[in-house]
Image (tube, helix red, strand yellow):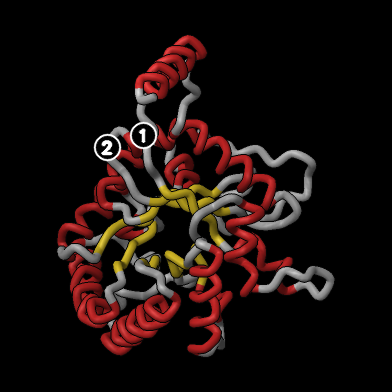
Amino acid sequence: MAQQQLLVTASTAPFLDRIESSDDPLALEDMPGFGAGELGVRGLSIPTSMLAGASASTLEALRDAGDKARCPMLLLVEDQPLDLANPDAKIRAASIERIGRLSKAAGILGCAQLGISIEGQEDSEESFELTASTIRDAMQRIDRFEVSLLIRSGSGVTADADRLTELIKKIGGFRIGSLPDFRLAHDTGDFAGVLRRLAPYAGTILATVGKAGPDGKQNAGRTDPTPYGLEEGLASVLAVGYQHAICLDHVGGPNAAKSIIEARSRIESALAPEVPEDVAGEETAQDGEGTGGGE
């Protein structure tokens, strides 16, 4: 079986406690080196809350650190849901302005993608159309920064996978997509089905690992089991041709690094199955014959 090519990345969010701790030397600008050297990943996502008040020079320094470590910043994720279907035009305009500012920040960081979630207005045709219209307006600000907008699953019009794909099609364009999460897909009760429906539109797929889901409480226990099968989720998205990034996330705490490293190792093993010994022996023999024939 040929090796499948997927980029395995990680979120910086699980390490916020360490970065903020005066007892831990890890700093935000160290994350690219930490990601490559300790976690073994090839890129990072970062939530907007970790960049609050950051200057352009800080963003540029992070980008440069990522390039140097060969672990670049790839995805900027807005923590707070955006009110894109509010009947008040001023509130919608503020959300559009926010997307514009974040797109600029993503561009400075070197991120090709911006992830957002949508505040949970009741799913109706009116809110659906208003959301699509607002995002289309926001896309005009995004295009000049060459950033793609990825919509997370959530509540309201994004609660159902089919409804989210309808929204993406309604918005249109090649810079709009989905940002699924293995954990959120698992929590729907239709793990493989949700992933298969959203993966064709995904620019990145999140995989929140560990016992707690997104926004859950940190687990200080000795074990931190992930409640879904990473390999099953991976098989589901590969089956529909997904070839982009899997971004590992965690709620943080003492188990974060261990859980992410274990998940990364499992994904890499699933992508590159072991070659049976008899086949490996044949390949080695053939390589030897080829070398000898050239002398």
Q: Amino acid at mark 2?
A: Val
Q: Position of residue 268 (x, y in %)?
A: 50, 37
Please provide percent x and percent y for residue 107: 37, 78
**Residue under the point 43% across and 65% down:** 75
The residue sitting at 48% across, 65% down in the picture is 72
How many numbered discs? 2
Q: Residue at x 24, y 67 (%)?
A: 127
- Residue that lies at the very extreme toward the front in this rendered image: 295
Local secondary structure at mark 2? loop
Q: Is residue 79 left or right of residue 241?
A: right
Q: Nearer the viewer, residue 57 or 87?
A: 57
> Is 205 situated above or below 145?
above
The residue where tag 2 is placed is 240
Between 52 and 44, the one nearer to me in the picture: 44
For label 1, count other residues whose C-alpha is less than 10 Å away and answer few (under 14), some (14-19) or many (20+): many
State the image coordinates of residue 236 (x, y, percent, origin top left): 36, 34
Dot 1 corresponds to which residue? 236
Residue 282 location in percent, x, y? 43, 12
Left or right: where 193 falls relative to 212: left
